[in-house]
Amino acid sequence: MQTDPLLQMRHIVKIFPGVLALNGVDFTLRRGEIHALMGENGAGKSTLIKVLTGVYPSDGGEIKVDGQVISIKSPQDAQMHGISTVYQEITLCPNLTVAENMFIGREDSVWINRKDYEKRADEILSNLGIPARSTQELGNCSLAVQQMVAIARAVDMRCKVLILDEPTSSLDDKEVNMLFDLMRDLKSKGVGIIFVTHFLEQVYEVSDRITVLRNGELVGEYTVEELPQVELVSKMIGKELGELSSMNEPQDSEAEKKEVFYEAENLSSSDALPFDFKIRKGEVNGFTGLLGSGRSESVRAIFGADKVTGGKVKINGKNVTITKPIEAMRNGIGYLAEDRKRDGIIADLSVRENIILALQVMNGILRPISRSEAESYADEYIKMLNIKTASRETPVGSLSGGNQQKVILARWLLTHPEYLILDEPTRGIDVGTKLEIQKLVLKLAEDGVSVTFISSEIEEMLRTCSRLVVMRDRHIVGELKGSDLNQTKVMQTIAGGESKDEEQI
Amino acid sequence: MKSKFKKIFAGGLGQLTIPLIAIALLVIFNLIRDPSFFSITFSHNNDGNTIIEGNLISIINGASELAILAMGMTLVTAACRGQDISVGAAAAIAGSVFVKVLKAFSVINPGTVIFAFICSCIVAMLFGCFNGVLVAVFKIQPMIATLILYTCGRSIAYWINGGATPNVKSHILSGIGSFIPGIPIPTPVLIVILMAVIFMLVFRFTSLELLTQSVGINESAAKLNGINSTFIKLLSFIILGVCVCVAGMIGVCRLGLINHETLLIDVEMDTILAVAIGGNNLGGGKFKISGSIIGAYVIQMLTTTLYAMKVSSTDVKAYKAIVIVLLVVIGSPVVKREFDKVVRNMKAKKKSVSKGAAES
């Protein structure tokens, strides 16, 4: 029963302009199995799922359900073949009742009267052990229950393959357990579940199998027993454990002796759990951890980008309050955000306007930077960072990703920050620019600027940082420096669990 | 001449191209229809002042309130990605306050007029603030938020006026509404120029333009750059409040009375239209105030042309709609894209032709 293939995807290829998003990926889902789909950002997980659910047409390969080749051209097709998805954000209507949500928009729902479908909904809910009544307004249920109603809806539509995309990211522990019980129940009923999550522990709690993707390619399919957590991490990141530190001998950094620039105690925000952190002048430190581990949330808290909820902050030994970006900026902190498009560039404005923006904001509304001043700043930084643009008046949105990133870097450098936070400055940009940015980081540190550098690529961080703060599941789980700065140690700390055994050996 | 033509079309359609072409077409159309349409004459008015008269002057004069409101509306549009539909109603309130305060004095002199203006300005800014708080703090869509004042504004004006349409007669007010002795140009036109200069100076001596555009294009990024987007949005509504007050005052001074039912009636949609015709994206972001001012004159010239063609006032709206549909469609991104494509193809052809010629 366990080995009966329910869904087979063979050699799936998906090409986006200029990017090979999926390169001949295979994926097999068996009846009554919970199958975790793992991979770092950009590995191709969501592309694969979107091909499977008909959101993207595939550019090659075949999909079989129950041994029959099917073509999926739209989400409706996928649903017809029994493939249902429950997305991270709940896509139901909170102002309708549970029953209405379960039957809304379904072909057969038009002819059913209210009493009938409420009765049917109650049956399904009690069958699945979901603690909700059909007449309840969905918005009044907890997030977990809403999630479960979405699942119940999918199940009632006779789904064979259920895709859960980050279902647990907004649930608390108790709710997660409720969800897992439901998943196990569905599994025993023969439903195949594809489980996408960032939380490693959760994978090991419910999954039977794990498929790992990296850079649009299949790394492999493993049973949970044969793939310990550390190895999973190394497969996701793409470095074997044996591949030990080929890094330059880490010296005890001179920065150790320098004075502390920024110090936070129990700093927390709406998105980050309380943490302690300090950075010295001229030090390059890194936050690492898998996606969703809380690294971005922590640095955002430092910059006051999210609602700061508590903690003490000292700059140069003096107490300060930083609850808004402008306060951080006035205290000499700059922050290059993770999502360049959403939080970085002002796409329609020119390179010049984008470069002077942060400095202009610091100057205040009544002290504008004159046109000629702005032009000379723009020219200076276009030359210094080697930004490739037709002119300084070109809208920044029309530049390539790497050059957009340089424009934002220029924006912060122009404010002459004493502490610069770079969140994934090298993501999605070409190798040449990556190296330029790394060099720039080291040069800044030489000039006495403190830098926090975040990257998904561990080598890059080992190359630039003298100290790494490691995070897992929104907690700081370790701080590595000196001789501990090597791939193995970092990966063990990220993965957790087994690192203790290693230390004992 | 040719190079200028090329400049306009080379980079696709610039923001001001369409409104300028619209004006040019209207002028040409009128010149063909009636060559004397734009004749300007000097005459004397009742007070014995030398003034200039003519269709062109009445167009420019008549569009004054619209142009002033369009300036403020451009800013609100850019920052809030939506429009304020309560400007007409708010102007009625501002005008009523202006008259009410004037009536409280036994004599009308420059001092009392300025005082009344300041009072009505404060009231208009407060109502702007009200709209602004709904939009910026409570994140209500601008059209919905301003629907409240749109609905109740003229009732509030009715209360202020005690249900009457009080009139105020003074040579100062008629000076504001028509001509100042010794100056042949209608005063409202001068006020438009003054407002435009003020806006220019504000943009020159503050960074409001950059900050507003940043908030309108990418609010999330703007916030992370330390911009207080709530303040910028609120400010745009307050500035529009000032424009509303000035427009309301001109309206009152033209007639010498306040009629809250008819003062600047239906002006809100024309204002939004002026912003749109001016090539500004109603979805916020980059803007040009000059475009909106030209847009206001396009609308007014269209109306005047239609009246001159003896189109009845009920039919005018329908004809206006036809022209506006054309303008808006021509200015739409789809047409722009297609137009750019055609231009590119033509260029490519030219190149290949010249290349082919060179080879042969």
Image (cartoon, grey):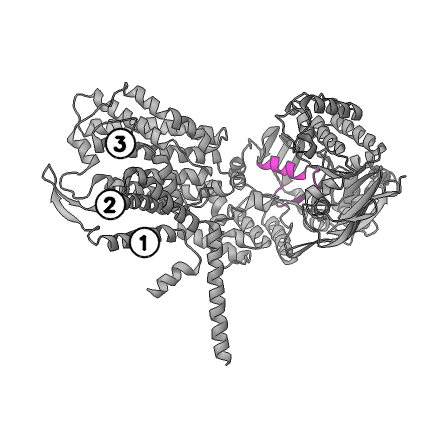
Q: Is residue A355 magenta?
A: no
* Residue at 41% over, 54% down: B14
Note whether A212 is above or below A403 in the view shown: above
Give the mark nearer the N terminus: 3 vs 1: 1
Residue located farthest toward the front when viewing the structure as drawn? A111
Q: Is residue A291 magenta?
A: yes
Note whether B329 is above or below A271 in the view shown: below
The tag on residue B25 is 1
Q: Are marks 3 and 1 on the same chain?
A: yes
Whether label 3 touches label 1, CB < 8 Å: no
Helix, strand or loop for disc 3: helix
Determine crowd level at label 3: few under 14, some 14-19, many 20+ residues with C-alpha closer than 10 A: many
Chain under disc 2: B
For marks 3 and 1, give the CA distance.
33 Å
Amino acid at pointer 3: Met
Determine crowd level at label 1: few under 14, some 14-19, many 20+ residues with C-alpha closer than 10 A: few
Give the mark nearer the N terminus: 2 vs 3: 3
For marks 1 and 2, give the CA distance.
16 Å
**Residue A501 placed where, x, y %?**
86, 38
For marks 2 and 3, give the CA distance.
28 Å
The tag on residue B308 is 2
Q: Are marks 1 and 2 on the same chain?
A: yes
Q: Which residues, given as a range, are shown in magenta? A: A280-303
* Residue at 47% over, 55% down: A392
* Residue at 72% over, 37% down: A166
Residue underneath mark 3: B249
Q: Are marks 2 and 3 on the same chain?
A: yes
Chain under disc 1: B
Helix, strand or loop for disc 1: helix
Helix, strand or loop for disc 2: helix
From the viewer's side, name the closer residue of B188 and A364: B188
